[in-house]
Structure formats: C-alpha cells, structure tokens
C-alpha cells in the first residue's frame, strides 16, 4: 500500500488553502497513493481567535470538506484532512481530523485530545484551551490492510494515547502537525520515531512548513517511519510538497514479534502516587 504525506504552508483564506491542496492530492494519487494525510490546520491557520471565529465554517455542510469528499471520490483514495477548526456551542472550537473514504463519504472524525496550556518563562501564558475544547475519545479507522490510529500534533507527547491505539488494533498512526521551528528542531524526529518504536507501528506525519501569513514559522520535515523506527521517507525542508512511500503490514508483525512490548506490558502500582 502506498501512502502520502502532504506538506503545506496554510494561510488565512480557506479557499486558497484548498486550491493549494488540490494539485498535491492529484500528485499523490498519480504516484499510486491510496491514502493521503494533510497537516494540522489545513483549511485555515489563523492569526488570532477573532479571525478564526470570522472564517471557521460549521461542520455540517462545510464547503471545503464537501470539495474534499469530491476529490476523494475522483481519485478513489482515502483523504485524511489532518485538522480544521470546527465551531462548538460554547464559543470554542474542536481541532478535528476528518477521514474520507474512496467513495467520498466521511468515515471517521477525531477531535484533538491534548491541548497545550503552558506558562513559559519570559513569555505570556499560552492557553490552547481558551480557544479549543479537547476531545475525549481515541479513534481508529479501517484502511483495508491497515488500521489507522488518529492523533494531532501535541498528542505525540503522550505515549499512553498511542499505546491505546495500538492495543485497539492500529498499525498505522497519523500525526498531522504544525510544529514550531525550535520544538521541531529539538523533538520532531525523536518523538515520532519513539512512537513508532514503542508501538511497532508505521507512523505518517504531515507537517505545516515555512513562514505563514499569520506571522508564525513552522518546521516542515514531513516523515514516514517504519515500525522499527527507521525514517523511510522525509521532506527535508519546510516547503510545500508531497511525500510518498510504500508500506507493508508484514513489517508491523515482524517488529512486534522481535520486540513484544505491547504483549509484555503490565499494570503496576506506585504507592503514594495518584493513579492515572
């Protein structure tokens, strides 16, 4: 099975972002990919919360998603929109992944679980939870020879989610992202390879890359990693592009037989500590 990671440089106009995505999906399909993943915040990478509120469309009847469904049917492939902002009744948004099947229908959605709330020395506090509501359900989806586990960006720092996805049958894990340059240089490759190694799964990470109209810079370097933790394909830059690689489920079985970490895991107690 061939899979594709689409690297983008999303801006402030959803229609312009969709127009940039369409030829890259066509390129992935022409290369034989039957599954393509786009980055986090594919449809709009906003400058601020007010701009997001003025441009984010309701999920039902979403115009850009309707077009993506048409493209999935046209190319006969699974298209996985890494994420887009979906308005919620409380005034916040869900950071939602949407998977389309080759028939153009939505087959799965996932709302990003882990939100980045931090007090950083010398900077103002960052509260992703002020804009987004975290999801509370892990999601897998059938891709034929593979079972897809869905995650988004900051999720990758929480191994328990990936362990749960693998134990639920996932052997290909999607990580759409919009990593900053400093954290990307320090952690991107290491974290993604670790998630592949500890679960014995294929990992595909589609990234935002470059200088965006909102003033932010993202790291790029979309990756496809095998179950042994080897990087089998990489866009070694921050420019838009298409990354395609062939993957095989047999390598999952081999990695998990050689290092049966999922099977060997045990529950344990830590006296005096709060239980997860």
Image (cartoon, grey):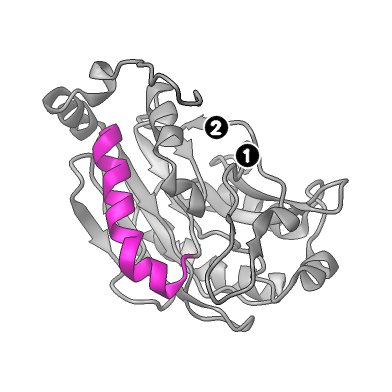
Residue range of the region highlighted in magenta in the rendering: 179-200
Inspect the magenta stretch and tell me whether residue 211 lies in it.
no
Residue topped by disc 2: 139
Within 10 Å of disc 2 (Cα), the crowding (few <14, some 14-19, many 20+) is some
Query: Considering depth in this image, is 209 or 104 the residue closer to the camera?
Result: 209
Name the residue that disc number 1 marks.
109
Q: In the rendered picture of this protein, how many numbered marks are placed on residues?
A: 2
Disc 1 or 2, which lies upstream in sequence?
1
Image point (28%, 19%), residue name: 265
Question: On the picture, is 117 further left or further right than 251?
Answer: right
| Residue 92 drawn above or below residue 274 | below
Q: Residue at x 44, y 64 (%)?
A: 207
In front here: 99 or 73?
A: 99
Question: Is the Cβ of the residue at disc 1 closer than 8 Å to that at disc 2?
Answer: yes
Query: Horizontal and vertical percent for residue 273?
Result: 46, 26
Extreme residue in the front direction: 272
- Tell me the SS state at disc 2: loop
Most frequent secondary structure within the magenta stretch: helix
Q: Magenta includes 195?
A: yes
User: In the rendered view of the protein, which quadrant contains the N terminus?
Assistant: top left
């Amino acid at each position: 099975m061939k899979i594709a990671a689409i690297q983008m440089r999303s801006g402030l106009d959803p229609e312009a972002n969709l127009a940039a995505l369409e030829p890259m999906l066509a390129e992935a399909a022409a290369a034989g990919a039957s599954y393509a993943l786009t980055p986090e915040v594919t449809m709009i990478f906003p400058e601020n919360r007010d701009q997001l509120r003025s441009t984010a469309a309701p999920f039902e009847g979403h115009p850009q998603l309707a077009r993506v469904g048409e493209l999935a049917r046209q190319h006969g492939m699974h298209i996985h929109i890494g994420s887009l902002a979906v308005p919620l009744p409380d005034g916040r948004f869900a950071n939602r992944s949407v998977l389309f099947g080759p028939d153009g229908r939505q087959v799965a959605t996932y709302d990003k679980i882990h939100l980045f709330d931090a007090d950083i020395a010398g900077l103002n506090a960052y509260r992703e939870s002020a804009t987004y509501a975290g999801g509370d359900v892990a999601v897998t989806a059938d891709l034929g020879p593979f079972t897809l586990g869905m995650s988004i960006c900051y999720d990758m720092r929480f191994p328990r989610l990936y362990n749960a996805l693998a134990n639920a049958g996932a052997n290909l894990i999607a990580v759409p992202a919009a990593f900053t340059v400093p954290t990307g240089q320090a952690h991107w490759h290491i974290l993604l390879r670790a998630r592949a190694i500890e679960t014995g799964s294929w990992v595909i990470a589609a990234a935002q890359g470059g200088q965006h109209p909102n003033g932010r810079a993202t790291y790029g370097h979309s990756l496809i990693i095998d179950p042994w933790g080897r990087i089998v394909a990489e866009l070694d830059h921050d420019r838009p592009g298409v990354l395609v690689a062939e993957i095989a489920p047999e390598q999952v079985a081999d990695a998990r037989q050689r290092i049966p970490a999922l099977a060997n895991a045990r529950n344990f107690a830590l006296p005096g500590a709060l239980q997860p």
